[in-house]
Amino acid sequence: MKKVADYRKMLNVDKTVTLKELKTIYRDVMKDCHPDKFSDEAEKLAAEEKSKDIIEAYHFLVSIAQETVADNLPEYTETITTSAIVDIHYESQTLKITFDNGSSYEYFVVPKTMYIKFMNSDSKGRFARRHIFHEFLYRNVAKSVAVEQ
């Protein structure tokens, strides 16, 4: 959750910000620190680094915004109900689950004890449906890619 808090602080927004408001704030912040605005090379490099951080923060916050989650709910529901878990990765209270349809989701602020119970469960899919999928803030980090024949 530190990542989420840091990104919100960087853009000076709270968790109730709408996508429209977030986009406006993002554009205003980018105007102030765009690298092309500076002539000094050191300032330009600093602005470039800050711009990259702001872009990353914006895209992350868009991915966890209530509107984005609501728009993607049908796809998410289909994935968690019909696809098997093929990979699990846990680091710094972030749990990443990859499904056999190619989708991957990150779940935030997952306690280590929950992760241990998850890994020790007889049925990872059933455990995740009961204790993870709808209990933690999440975002889609990899979308499935359809291959045309």
Image (spheres, rainbow, N blue to C red):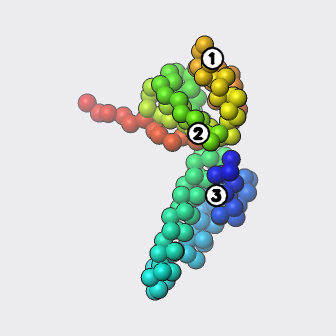
Residue 67 as seen in the image, left or right of residue 85? right
Q: Tell me where residue 57 sits by quadrant.
A: bottom right
Circle 1 packing at 10 Å, graded few (<14), some (14-19), many (20+), is few
Secondary structure under the numbered disc 2 in the rendered image: strand
Q: Does the CB distance between marks 3 and 2 fall below 8 Å?
A: no
Of circles 3 and 2, the one toward us is 2
Residue 70: image tag: none
Using the rendered image of the protein, determine whether residue 71 is visible from the camera's viewpoint.
Answer: no
List x then y, in percent, for residue 70: 63, 41
Instruction: Point out the frontmost of discs 3 and 1.
Output: 1
Q: Residues within 10 Å of mark 3 (few under 14, many from 20)?
A: many
Q: Quadrant of the C terminus?
A: top left
Q: Is residue 46 above or below residue 114?
A: below
* Front residue of this view, candidates 20 and 127: 127
Which residue in the structure is indicated by mark 1?
A: 121
Q: Amino acid at mark 1?
A: Ser
Q: Which of the two residues, 60 or 78, is positioned nearer the viewer here?
A: 60
Which residue, as the protein is rendered here, is positioned at the far bottom?
A: 39
How far from the left and from the top, in percent, is residue 8? 68, 58
Mark 1: which secondary structure?
loop
User: Circle 2 is placed at which residue position?
Assistant: 91
